[in-house]
Image (cartoon, rainbow, N blue to C red):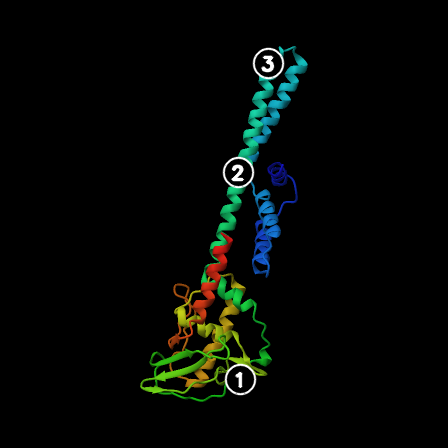
């Protein structure tokens, strides 16, 4: 009974575009409960909305039915001929119905499989993280020009992210320049927190954590997303220039299609913050498969 109901749902109901299905899927995966009923509904709607080439065979089956009815009306046929004609059409109908359902399921599996696979990319993960951050430009802390090391090349500077026992998401910063190691610096002194909330990190801090694991970093997304990410990276570049001092080429290169953005300052995250984010995403994606 359940299989018959599912078969009926795969044929009859509202059709959706792949974008609509994709939006519903991502809305579901971002929800806190991820209920099975919604997941099942998306799967049924997604499979039903796929376009199968086997659907083109229905017209030939309909033509055979019409031809059979016309011949039956025109001529008197033996009962055995009617039985054979009926069985022939019924078998074709059943096989094609099964083929359409199987093909729609396979098409949807390939589509949703790509959606899930894309979730593993760093670009998608970064964009999801940035979307969850609400920032007011007026609330971002301004960085006074300190010119700490105006005569040192960018590659000779190292920034370490060190654990903060009070807040794992807001590690302290330590700079290493040659043999000179700074004391622990609060991210607010780098302008990496909000002005009125020193415990709230900015998206520029997220980019700093990202560069600790992926440098250079090439973003794969559409134009508006890329522009949004670039604004955060330029903000981080300005922070570096203000804190360490202006010199030659900037601390972060312009975007190049072949490699993306490259940070010339060495960044080492001893807290593995970004690795943990990637690990959580991996577990989340695995649970969907």
Spatial CA span between label 3 and label 2 = 32 Å
CA–CA distance between discs 1 and 2? 59 Å
Q: Residues within 10 Å of mark 1 (few under 14, many from 20)?
A: some
Above-or-below relation of 184 to 36: below
Q: Name the residue under label 1.
A: 142
Residue 102 makes an appearance in the image: yes
Residue 243 occupies quadrant:
bottom left
Mark number displayed over residue 81: 3
The local secondary structure at tag 1 comes to loop
Q: Which mark is residue 80?
A: none
Q: In which quarter of the image is residue 274?
A: bottom left
| Callout in the foreground (1, 3) | 3
Give how far across and how far down residue 94 sits, in percent: 57, 29
The residue carrying mark 2 is 102
How far apart are labels 1 and 3 at the CA level? 89 Å
Measuring from the top left, give residue 99's x and y in whole percent.
Answer: 53, 34
Label 3 crowd bin: few (<14), some (14–19), many (20+), radius 10 Å: few
**What is the x, y in percent for residue 249?**
39, 78
Q: Which residue is drawn at 45% across and 78% down?
A: 237
Instruction: Give the SS element for disc 2.
Output: helix
Q: Is residue 62 left or right of residue 149?
A: right
Give the mark nearest the N terminus, 1 or 2.
2
């Amino acid at each position: 009974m359940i299989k018959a109901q599912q078969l009926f749902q795969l044929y009859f109901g509202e059709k959706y575009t792949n974008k609509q299905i994709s939006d519903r899927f991502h809305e579901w995966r971002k929800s806190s409960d991820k209920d099975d009923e919604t997941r099942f509904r998306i799967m049924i709607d997604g499979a039903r909305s796929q376009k199968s080439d086997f659907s083109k065979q229905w017209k030939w089956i309909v033509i055979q039915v019409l031809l059979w009815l016309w011949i039956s009306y025109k001529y008197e046929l033996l009962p055995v001929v009617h039985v054979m004609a009926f069985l022939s059409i019924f078998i074709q109908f059943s096989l094609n119905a099964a083929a359409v359902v199987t093909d729609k399921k396979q098409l949807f599996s390939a589509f949703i499989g790509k959606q899930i696979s894309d979730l593993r990319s760093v670009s998608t993960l970064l964009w999801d993280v940035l979307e969850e951050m609400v920032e007011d430009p007026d609330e971002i802390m301004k960085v006074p020009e300190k010119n700490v090391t105006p005569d040192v090349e960018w590659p000779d500077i190292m920034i370490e992210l060190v654990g903060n026992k009070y807040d794992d998401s807001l590690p302290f910063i330590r700079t290493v320049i040659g043999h000179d190691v700074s004391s622990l610096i609060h991210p607010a002194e780098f302008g990496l927190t909000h002005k009125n909330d020193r415990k709230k990190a900015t998206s520029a801090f997220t980019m700093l954590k990202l560069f600790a694991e992926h440098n250079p970093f090439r973003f794969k997304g559409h134009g508006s997303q890329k522009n949004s990410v670039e604004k955060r990276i330029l903000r981080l570049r300005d922070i570096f220039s203000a804190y360490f001092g202006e010199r030659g080429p900037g601390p972060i290169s312009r975007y190049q299609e072949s490699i993306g953005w490259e940070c010339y300052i060495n960044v080492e995250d001893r807290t593995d913050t970004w690795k943990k984010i990637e690990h959580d995403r991996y577990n989340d994606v695995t649970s969907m498969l």
